[in-house]
Amino acid sequence: MDLTIDDVCELLNVSKKTIHNWLDEGKIPGYKLGGKIRFSRPEIEDWLVRSKTQKGKDLLQKDNLIHLKSDRAKKIVAQKIGTNAYSLFRALYKGTVINNVHGDTKEDVLRSAVKIIAKNLSLDANVLTDLLLDRENLMPTALNHGVAVPHTRDFLLPKSYDVVSVVYLNKPIDYGSLDGEKVKTLFFLFACDDKRHLHLLAKIAHLTRNEESLNFIHQHPGKAHLLNYIKNWETKLCIPGLAKIN
């Protein structure tokens, strides 16, 4: 699926000027088709995982925050509550949190976790595992700082909602991370729509670049505590389209 510049602006919560600057500087993959800028969904997905734009910085800067008690904030949340405002919270609510998963290799832990995850999604565990491993063979889905986001390349969840399940490993394993750090927490991502998939991937990447969030996640909180944290974290984010960078 091709994305327009408006799609990418909304997904990343940045202005068109920022996207054009990144294109000029070669920081984001894009191309022209019929005189219009287009973006490949797989390329943007890989770019999000690899964080090619601003290493050491966050795409969502503090300038994107709004005063939570303001009338504007209340109006924004009221307008967006059904779309992107709490998308990660809702996906985690639909998913599960799995503790103490054992395995010495990536394939070991994926197979162990998927046995539980597939059952909750009414999907075939072997097929789903193969799809996840195919994606890993193309490029590891590890972010930095001990976190990975296993997901499939083309498979969309045959539901009307998205699901994110969090898996805590018994011990850190090699996962092909850019920073060389072993992975100990996995966010399994299954979306029902391409744009929602990318939106959630961007949110998870943003969440796990925050030191406070990482410290909390690596304490292996239970589902209730994790949901409460994510809800508060998402509340503090600017709603896309209203407070752009630049």
Image (cartoon, grey):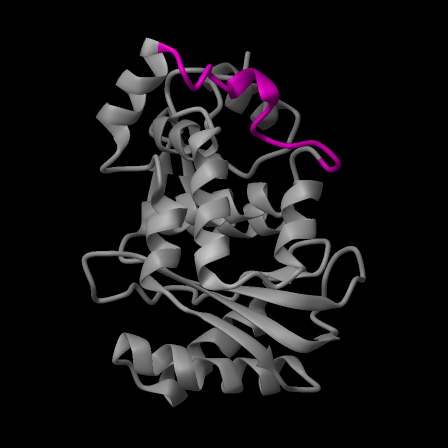
The answer to whether residue 194 is magenta is no
In percent of width and height, residue 130 lies at: 45, 83
Q: In the drawing, does residue 220 fall left or right of residue 19?
A: right
Q: Position of residue 134 (x, y in %)?
A: 50, 76
Q: Nearer the viewer, residue 44 or 169?
A: 169
Does the magenta run of residues contain 61?
A: yes
25 or 94: nearer the eye?
94
Range of the magenta residues?
55-70
Q: Is residue 19 visible?
A: yes
Residue 113: percent from the left, percent from the top?
A: 49, 80
Count of number-bearing discs: 0
Examine the image and state in which quarter residue 81 appears: top left
Q: In the image, 66: left or right of 158?
A: right
In the picture, measured across the screen, residue 24 lies left or right of residue 44, that is right
Nearer to the camera, 216 or 127? 216
Q: Residue at x 42, y 42 (%)?
A: 231
Report the residue that reaches farthest toward the left: 160
In this picture, is 199 found above or below 192? above
Residue at 46% across, 16% down: 66
Query: Is residue 113 placed above or below 200 in the rendered structure?
Result: below
Q: Quadrant location of the C terminus?
A: top right
Task: Report if residue 1 is visible in the image.
Answer: no
Q: Tell whether 75 sits left or right of 190.
A: left
Residue at image position (59%, 31%) is 59
- Viewer-nearest residue: 83 or 19: 83
Percent x, y of residue 181: 79, 62
Q: Quadrant of residue 120?
A: bottom left
User: Would you say the magenta stretch is mainly helix, strand or loop?
Assistant: loop
